[in-house]
Structures are given as C-alpha cells and as structure tokens.
Image: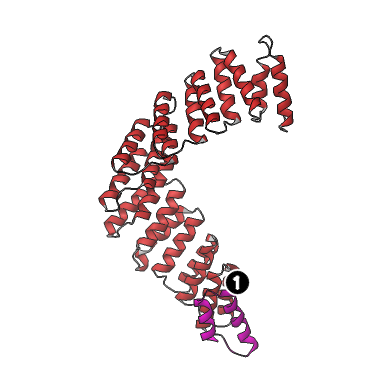
Amino acid sequence: CTAAITACVKAGRGNEALEIFDQMSNQGVAPTVITYNLALSACSKSGKWKQALTLLQNMCTNGFEPNLISYSTAISACERVGKWEDALRIFEQMDENNVTPNVIAFSTAISACAKGGQPLRAVEILDSMPQKGVEPNLYCYSAAISACAQQGMWKESLKLLQQMSIKGVRADDIVLKTILQGCAHAGKWLEAYKLLLDMNARGFGFDRTSYNWAIMACEKDKQWKHAMYLLQDMQLKDIDPDEHTYTTIMKSCGYQWLEVLQILKQVKRSRVVPNEAMYTVAVNSCIADGESSQAWQLIQEMHTRKLRPNTYTYNGAIKSCRKHDNMKLAIVLLNDMIRHNVAANSYTRDLALNLCSTKGQRNLVNRLLKETVRSKYEA
C-alpha cells in the first residue's frame, strides 16, 4: 500500500492515493506515520485542506505523533488555498508538541500570511526564526516582503531588503520587483528609481516591467518630468515602451496638455498603436486646461481611428465648453454623442437641460432624453 500511495502522489493522482489510504483500514492494514504523511501530501497537492486537517487530527487520535513532515505538509495544504488562520494554528501546534519547524515550515507559514493579507504576522514569524535556531532564506524573505508590499507597507519591504543584505541573503529579481511594485502603488518615485538602479547594480539589468513600475510611481506623485526622463532612459537602452508605459506617462502629466499631446505624437511614430485609454487621457488633459476645441479634435481623431469615446469623455468635454462659454461646440459634442450611439447618463441629461436656454436647441435636448431612455439608463 505504501508503494502504491507513493506512486500515485508522485504522479499527481491525489484522489487515487487517498482512495488507497482509505481502503487500508477496510483491508485490515494499519496506517503508519509514513502513510499518513503521504495522504497529507496527496491532500495538499489536490487542494483538500479540510481533509488534511482531519488526517492530522486522526493521527493524534490513533496514537501517532505527527512529525515535522506531517505538520509542514498540513500547513502547505492550507497555504495553497489561502487558509492562513488554519495554517498558523497548525504552525503553533508544532511548538506546543515540541516539534521544531524547519526553514520550509517557516517559509510556508509566512507565505500563508502573505496570501491572507497579514503582513505583521508574516514579519513576526520571520523575526522569530533565529530564536528557533533557523536562519531565514530567500523564500522566507520573499514571502514576507510580498506580504508587506501587497498591503502598502513599502517601508517595511525596504527594511527587510536591507536585513537580507546584512544577513548575506542575496535578493533575486522577483524580490526587487515586488518591492518596486509596492513603491509604485504608494507613489514613492524616488525609492522606485533607486531600486531600478539597484537592480542593475546587482546584475539583473533593466527591463520594461521594472521601468513601468517606476513610471507608475512618478504618475502617482504627479512627477511627470521624472516620468519623461525614465521614458528617454528606456529608449536610450533600447527598451521598447508599450501601451502601459505611454498611458501612465500621459497620466502623470495631468494638466500639461501640450506635453500629453507630444507623447501621443511619439506614440504614433512608434510601433505602439494608440488606444482608447491614451486618447481619453489626452482629452481629459485638454479639458482640464480649458482646451475644449483641442479635446474635440482628439475625439474626431478617435472616430477616424475607429476608437470609441465613452460617456465620461463626452461629458467632460461638454462641461468644459459650458465653463468657457463655448456653447456651439457643446451642442456639436451632444450631436456627435447621439450620432455615435454613446449611452447618455444622468449627468449628460443635466448638461443637456442646461442648454435648453440656447435658442433652437430644445429638439436636441428631447432627442438626447429619448436616447437616455432608449439606452435603459434610469435617470
């Protein structure tokens, strides 16, 4: 039976392995710690975390003492499906039963915390490792850093990176990109830029993904000049920007509509095809600075390229026209919106109603209201 279960587990046939294990008792074959561990492994690999917990409990009930492999495998079963609380409960049982965790058990418990969004618990477990006579390895640090980065704890991620250096644990590109991503979401452009340089200094080189994260950090903090510098640096290093690169840089420019249009021109000269997101950013930038006519030109260009401006693009342009007393263009935009079957919402309706005072435009408003009803929008 042991050989048969082992073969099934190695072949990835977890259900078969568990069936053989269950049949053992019916055939009068007593289980052993080894067969229990094999069954636990089958549960872990097939996502049967509840059954793994039951097996672990049955071991104790039937007079067997779970060993390091038993506990580690049960923790892994819970970690794989994101059951961090159960994983930590089993991890704590190891200490209660005088079973010292090894580096694999620690890294799996930390990973469970990461998947469960528990960065503080992850760091706590990491910090406890030396007390148990176990030194953290790359996987332990990687899991803890991931836990922190995912929850916006970019400072803690950087501290752990520094700790790795002190401990002589070499970070890989995955660790550095994880921290870079955390800094990007937090808008910490300077830290992101330093990490970009650090990655190159460590021999990992530069790639588009890393640049995109650094550019996102600039966008979050509205550091458009630094974002532009990173774009130029990419091109000097023969790293081709993609749609995400250009769109993020355009967003970073905010009201700097001339800069946004320059980037859009650059996109047209590149191998990247301008998309709706880029044009929407460009239109919004023009609108924000009162350049309604330029926004209208961009919308017309979208039609030429068979791109579809959305409701919010039109609403923003119409609002800008009203704000700057360009009522003729506002009416043109409303007509264009109807002609291209862009669904109106309540805000569009309100904008249209405010145009009623303009002579001869009530028919337009009525048409728009009919379109609003036709698009099944509940005003």
* Residue 144 vertical placement versus 87 (above, below): above
10 Å crowding of disc 1: few (<14), some (14-19), many (20+): some
Task: Check if residue 164 falls in the magenta segment.
Answer: no
Magenta range: 1-30
In the structure shown, which secondary structural element does the residue marked by tag 1 occupy?
helix
Q: Which percent across, then down, holds residue 55?
A: 58, 75
Place residue 361 in its image quadrant: top right
Residue placed under numbered mark 1 in the picture: 51
The kind of residue tagged 1 is Gln
User: The N terminus is located in which quarter?
Assistant: bottom right
Q: Residue furthest front?
A: 304
Q: Main secondary structure of the magenta part?
A: helix
Describe residue 210's horizontal placement relative to residue 364 as left or right.
left
Outermost residue to the left: 201
Residue 18 counted in the magenta span? yes
x, y percent for residue 69: 46, 75
